[in-house]
Amino acid sequence: MPPKGKGPQGKRITLKVAKNAVRVLFNGRRRLELSKMGITTFPKCLLELADVEEIDLSRNMLRKIPNIIEKFQNLVWLDLHSNQIEELPAEIGTLQNLTFLNLCNNKLTTKGLPEQLTQLRNLRTLNLGLNCLETIPTTLGSLRELVELGLFDNSLTIIPKSVKKLPKIERMNVKRNPLPEFAKEEEPIDTVKRIESLYLVEKKDLCSTCLQMCQGERDELHKLEDMTPGPSDKPNFTSLTTPNSTARDNQEEWRIKEEEDDNPENIPRHSTDHIPGSPAQ
């Protein structure tokens, strides 16, 4: 059990472990791969490897990045996604060679983004998706080299014009934010009520309220007949009733309505289970 008042201790990373985690990539860069190591605090021993060009600390339990990050001046690529980072140090802005910064799936708030973030003039990819951002600073528009920007799954209601008009931006993911332009359009109202079953009853079996309701529905159906579109390529069976939704494509289940038209006593209505005041079965 961890000491009272403290979070999980995580795995201790020694200098030996860190050195063994250095990989040389095909482009000659050295990447320090410490992903999924259960790390809760930034290991100070990494200062002995401050000349690496890439660091992968993703999928750990880091809550903060210390200001000693400024010692890693050779950094070109920094992956910190899927941690618990709530804020970034101002010193992040000193990493002038950084072109890739992944901060996706953390707990960053708008206040947790330092103004110095906009000093990363060579940044080409910035991922801030899956965080707790309600706004993003307009000064992000000064990152003129940005090609990819991830802002998805936050609480953004507006994207600053300065960000929208970044000169080199090619991909900007803002999905699943409450942005007005992505508000779900209201679905068109279907004026035709789809029913699963249709029963024919006589007027005498209905109370006055139900009779009035059914007559109103019948009048609505007659209005819809007048609004029916012109002839199409499909055959028009004028002597048949409109099919139920479950029999729309099955001509054999359609009902002949000629007798109904001749006998006004028969009024179409829904199942009596849904009409108040209907007689018991």
Image (cartoon, helix red, strand yellow):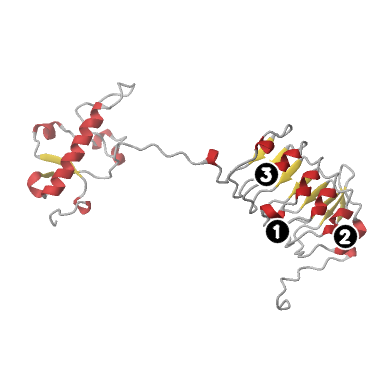
Residue 86 numbered mark, or none: 1
Q: Quadrant of the N terminus?
A: bottom right
Where, by quadrant of the figure, is residue 198 drawn?
Answer: top left
Q: Which residue is mark 2?
A: 46
**Mark 1 closeness class: few <14, some 14–19, many ≥20 residues within 10 Å:** some
Q: Which residue is mark 3?
A: 150
- What secondary structure is found at the residue carrying circle 3? strand
100 lies above or below 144:
below
Cα gap from disc 1 to disc 2, whole angstroms: 21 Å
- What secondary structure is found at the residue carrying circle 1? loop
Residue 214 relative to residue 182: left or right: left
Residue 245 relative to residue 208: left or right: right
Q: Upstream in the sequence, badge 1 or badge 2?
A: 2
Task: Confirm whether residue 200 shows in the render.
Answer: no
Q: Upstream in the sequence, badge 1 or badge 3?
A: 1
Q: Upstream in the sequence, badge 3 or badge 2?
A: 2
Please tell me which residue is depicted at 65% across the width and 36% down the height of the picture. 161
- What secondary structure is found at the residue carrying circle 2? helix
Amino acid type, callout 1: Glu
Residue 262 relative to residue 29: left or right: left
Using the image as rendered, state which of residue 236 and residue 56 is in the foreground: 56
Please tell me which residue is depicted at 67% across the width and 46% down the height of the picture. 136
Cα gap from disc 3 to disc 2, whole angstroms: 28 Å
**Mark 2 closeness class: few <14, some 14–19, many ≥20 residues within 10 Å:** many
Please tell me which residue is depicted at 78% across the width and 64% down the height of the picture. 41
Cα gap from disc 1 to disc 3, whole angstroms: 17 Å
Amino acid type, callout 3: Gly
Label 2 near label 1: C-beta < 8 Å? no
